[in-house]
Image (cartoon, rainbow, N blue to C red):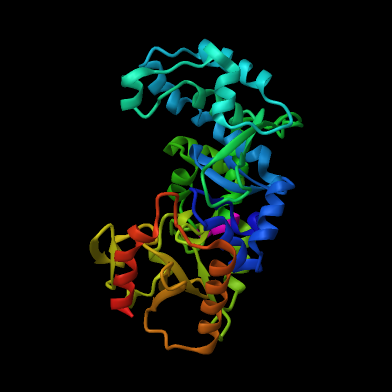
Amino acid sequence: MLERSGWARSVGGVGPYLTLFARAGTSREAADAAVAALQIHELPTARGCTYVLPASDFALGLRVAQPFDRGEMRTAEKLGVTDAEIEKLCDAVLKALGKTPLDPDTIRAAVGSASRNLGDEGKKRGMITTLPLALGRLQTRGDIRRVPVDGRLDQQRYKYVRWTPNPLAKSKTSIEEALTELGRRFFRWIGPATRKEFQEFAGLGVKGSKEAVAPLGLVPVEEDGDLLMLPDDAEAFHRFTAPAEPQYALVSSLDAIAAARRDIQRLLDDKDRKRTVLVEAKEGPLSGFYDLPNHAILDRGRLVGLWEFDVDSSSIVWTTFGVKKAKPLQQKIDEMEAFIRDQLGDARSFSLDSPKSRKPRIEALRRMA
């Protein structure tokens, strides 16, 4: 599923679980087992962000993450941290790690003075010690990987372990070749899309994005249009006839169908663009959003509704846009509700999402319904 529909954005929420369950009915237990077996894994990748990737893409994901390794280092340099210092710390971390995952505190004690506190100025910049810099660098190099403390993808507490063999050990792919392959993946997952949307997904500049996709032979969906597809996908796209019967799916607010392009407008009917939703305590029309304001209800790729999970009632609160309540839709809602209640416990969009912070969104959905 991750190979075909796109890497699952992971920010300490349930997005990866919902991606797999909505498309393949994958249980949380099966997903966690796949993580434990390294069939899938959470990695820093495109533009330095974390996604859950299939094993076939581990090397590619790490390679396209490497140009973004300098971001935090630039901040650290202002605090007097040097590359040589971090390289020395990386060596110390590798010596400390073995086959047993260690938490950051244990690693910090093991490396001793190789890691140092960056004082009040570092604290102001969100950089308390130098250890996270080394851990981040070693991850993008494929030397170590982080392991969820309880084996779950919807939290952000980790231990670290050596990655043997390093998934990059046999890779001879240049960064230019990797970015072209990332472009191929992107347009295969989410086309039609614009080159600018790929540029933002990959974290590239205008020139870099053009050079990356040039070998792909992308073709416009419509003459002189900016929406592009891979040639064989374009042929299939023009032959395709949408099913006559509804095909409902409940997906996460960070599902690749919207998050990869950061554009929900192409998922909306014109009549739904002015519908009002609540985001960050402010109301506004759907036409003003790039990202999904809630988890989404889709029908054959069209955004037809929104939903959230209410922990107090252990139920899904939802609304649809002009869709009559129907048995197939209710069945999908009931299935997702049972999955969250029995296997996940909650449906946080991201790590800081909480039942309390979600209440205004839930009440807004009730009013819309």
Q: Position of residue 16 (x, y in %)?
A: 57, 56
User: Measuring 48% from the left and 56% from the top, which residue is drawn there?
Assistant: 193
- Nearest the viewer among 180 and 318 is 318
Q: Classify 325 as above or below 333.
A: below
Q: Classify 151 as above or below 251.
A: above
Q: Position of residue 96 (x, y in %)?
A: 66, 21
Secondary structure mostly taken by the magenta-highlighted segment of the chain:
helix
Q: How many marks overall? A: 0
Q: Position of residue 61 (x, y in %)?
A: 61, 40
- Nearest the viewer among 70 and 148 is 148
Residue 229 visible (yes or no): no
User: Measuring 32% from the left and 65% from the top, which residue is drawn there?
Assistant: 359
- Nearest the viewer among 351 and 293 is 351
**Residue 271: quarter of image:** bottom left
Q: Is residue 249 left or right of residue 165?
A: left
User: Measuring 42% from the left and 88% from the top, which residue is drawn there?
Assistant: 324
Residue 196 visible (yes or no): yes
- Nearest the viewer among 198 and 89 is 89
- Quarter holding the C terminus is bottom left
Q: Position of residue 248 (x, y in %)?
A: 53, 77
In magenta stretch: residue 358: no
- Quarter holding the N terminus is bottom right
Q: Which residues are magenta?
A: 188-192
User: Measuring 56% from the left and 62% from the top, which residue is drawn there?
Assistant: 344
In magenta stretch: residue 189: yes
**Residue 147: quarter of image:** top right
